Structure formats: structure tokens, C-alpha cells
Image (cartoon, grey):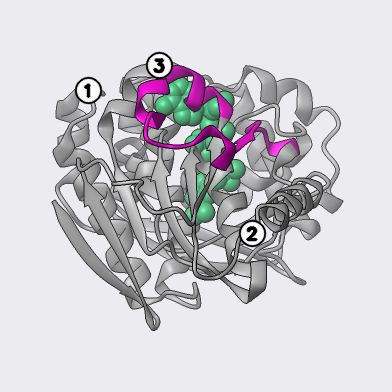
Amino acid sequence: MRKMYRLNHKSSEVIYGEIPKFSYSLNLYIVDKNVFELHQTFFNEINSNDIYFFDASEGNKSFFEVQKIIEWLKNKNFNRSGTMWGIGGGITLDITGFVASIFMRGCKLNFIPTTLLAMVDAALGGKTAVNLSNIKNMIGTFYPAEKIYIEPNFLTTLSSTELKEGWSEIIKISLIQESNLYEEILQSNLKVSDDIIQKAISLKMEICERDPEDRAERNLLNLGHTFAHIIESISQFEISHGNAVAIGIESAALLSLRSRWISKEVFEKIMFPWRKFKLIRKKKLINYMKNFDENLIYKDKKMSQQINLILFNGFQSTFKTNFKKNHLIKEILLDITKNEV
Ligand SMILES: NC(=O)c1ccc[n+]([C@@H]2O[C@H](COP(=O)([O-])OP(=O)(O)OC[C@H]3O[C@@H](n4cnc5c(N)ncnc54)[C@H](O)[C@@H]3O)[C@@H](O)[C@H]2O)c1
């Protein structure tokens, strides 16, 4: 299956279940080294000298690594007639996209996401990012990949914990707007299917097409992310992104309930898939909350004087609001650590 999307003046094609041809000489690859080791036959057609083996961690999603990759590209005499490929999870794609967007003012870029989270989220829509010390995604650009190859076989080597990371983003998109994805998730018993992946991709890409630079509707995709970035920062990235998003969505739902934007019944419906599939892990958060620094709230890039939050005002209905009561963030996080969902 192939589907072309328009993001501003660029096209971004999602190609499902087709292995790309790597026959051009001017290709260079930034590859998650775990993925290379686990899927060596996939890389048979690629000369290993053309691969930059990337150690995917939030600590390496950094300027230091950006510079190392750029120097490697320069030594390879890479130029704008070549294509850069990012092959890996969200961390690898975020940094590859960022380098591609700034190297010689932008070169061709293709992605092969290898985690569920990257297939349904990080590879799509052109947001690139690196962290600045422990501030998440502080630096980035909008630079969509021209081609995104979704190869579900990569999912066979993911652990159940890593698969849960992806499910967090799939459930998130099912809660943002009306669709039958929510029911399909409940019926799936967390068995990944082509249909669910494709539906999640379409829902995200359609929002990105309408608002490629995240100025209005696309903000809704940040549901749970204001909390998530704080959680990732206070845990120095010990709490993974997908789990932080899950905790963040519970926090947003609880704040919506307390602010009377949603009823208890809607709150329960929002929380149902997370509980049914035991997707939220909070044990680590309890420890990190002891050292919670309120200033981190202001360092999140989504915030200025006020806190920008995406909250629920119904089931599959979300809205953006500015929150002045910053202490509520800490209060909500402390409260949700007390209840295991
Ligand atoms: N740009 C965006 O729009 C966007 C959206 C969502 C998340 N993100 C970013 O994505 C990152 C999280 O991505 P992720 O969850 O994919 O994490 P990741 O890139 O760290 O990958 C998780 C782990 O899985 C390993 N891995 C990757 N593919 C594998 C495979 N097929 N089999 C076995 N192991 C494999 C990696 O080596 C790593 O250890 C975060 O930095 C987040 O900020 C970006």
C-alpha cells in the first residue's frame, strides 16, 4: 500500500509492506546498531561502509552526535544529490531528520521506522529533534521524510515493553478525535495488525496535512506530552517516552475531570484501554517525584508564562488550553503516583 501526503510544499509518501531498493550509490544510512545486529539480512544489499552505526539513547539524541554524524557525512563526500536514510526507532529518526534538514541546507531523506512507536508516530509528519542536556526535544526543525517504508517484520524482535511504547501513541491518537480505532484497539487484545497500524498512520498524517507546522489542530497530538516531557526530564530519561506519554494522558484526563470538563464516566472510558492492557508503569515515577523541580515546568519548550496543555472536553474530544496554576502539574503527578491504574 502506498499513500502520498502533502506537508506544506513537500510530499511525504508512506509505503506499507514493500522493501525498498538500496541500489543507488549516493545513499548513506544512519542505522540503529541494535536493529542492524538483529536484522542483518535486511542490510545485505548495503555496503557497511555506508552505514553510520548509531547507539540509540536519549543521551545520544544530542548536538554532540549531530556533529559526529555531520563529520562522517563530510568525510564520505556526501552531498545534496545523495539520500540520507534513517533506519531505527524514534530516537534514530529524530536525529537523522535533524541532520538531513541542516546538512548543506537540507538533503533528501527517507525513513525506515523499526519500532511500533516510530511506525505510527515518530517517522510521520516531519518533526525532527535533539535534546539539550536533559531538556527534551529543545532543538528541532520541520523536515518530512520523502519516503517512509513501513516493514512490520521489524516488530518481531521488539520486546513486549517496547511494543507497549507504540501502543501508547496508538491509543493517544484514538482518543484525540472520532474514529473506530478505539474499539479496534480494545478488540485487538494488543495484537498488532496491518489495519491498526495503517489507521493510526492515516489519522496522524491527515492532521499533519491540515496543520503541518503545529500551529493549531496538530497541537492536539501533544496530548499527554507536556506532562511526559517533564516526567522524562525529572527521570533523566530513565522513564521511556511511551510510558511517560501514557502517564501524561492519565494526568491530562484527571485534570480534565477535576476541572469538570469531563464526567467520571468519560474519564473511565478514556482510562479503560490503559487499565485493560496494563500499559502504565509508575513505580519509577514515585521516586523521581521526591526531587521534583518546579522550574522544569517552565523549561519545557511548549511553555512560556503559562502552561499549554491539551485536555479532554469529552470522549474523543480534546482542546488546547493555557493553564496559569502551575502548581497543579505537580499536584496531579503526585496524585496519580498514588493510584496504580
Ligand atoms: N518526531 C516525532 O514526531 C516523534 C513522535 C514520537 C516520539 N518521538 C521520539 O521518539 C523517541 C522514542 O522512540 P522509540 O520508542 O522508537 O525509541 P528508540 O528509538 O529508543 O528505540 C527503543 C529501543 O528499541 C531498539 N530497537 C529499535 N528497533 C528495534 C527492533 N526492530 N527490534 C528490537 N529492538 C529495536 C532500539 O535500539 C532502542 O534500544 C523519543 O525520543 C521521542 O521523543 C518523536
Relative horizontal placement of residue 122, taking residue 66 as reference (left or right): left
* 101, above or below 56, in the image: below
Residue 179 horizontal/vertical position (percent): 18, 53
Mark 3 vs ligand 1: CB under 8 Å?
no
Residue bounds of the magenta highlight:
33-59
Q: Is residue 230 magenta?
A: no
Disc 1 marks a residue whose amino acid type is Lys
Q: CB under 8 Å between callouts 2 and 1?
A: no
* Residue on which the image places disc 2: 99
* Residue on which the image places disc 1: 191
Q: Nearer the viewer, residue 130 or 255?
A: 130
Residue 181 horizontal/vertical position (percent): 19, 44
* 8, above or below 191, in the image: below
Residue appearing at x 14%, y 40% in the figure: 195
Disc 3 marks a residue whose amino acid type is Ser
Q: Secondary structure at mark 1?
A: loop
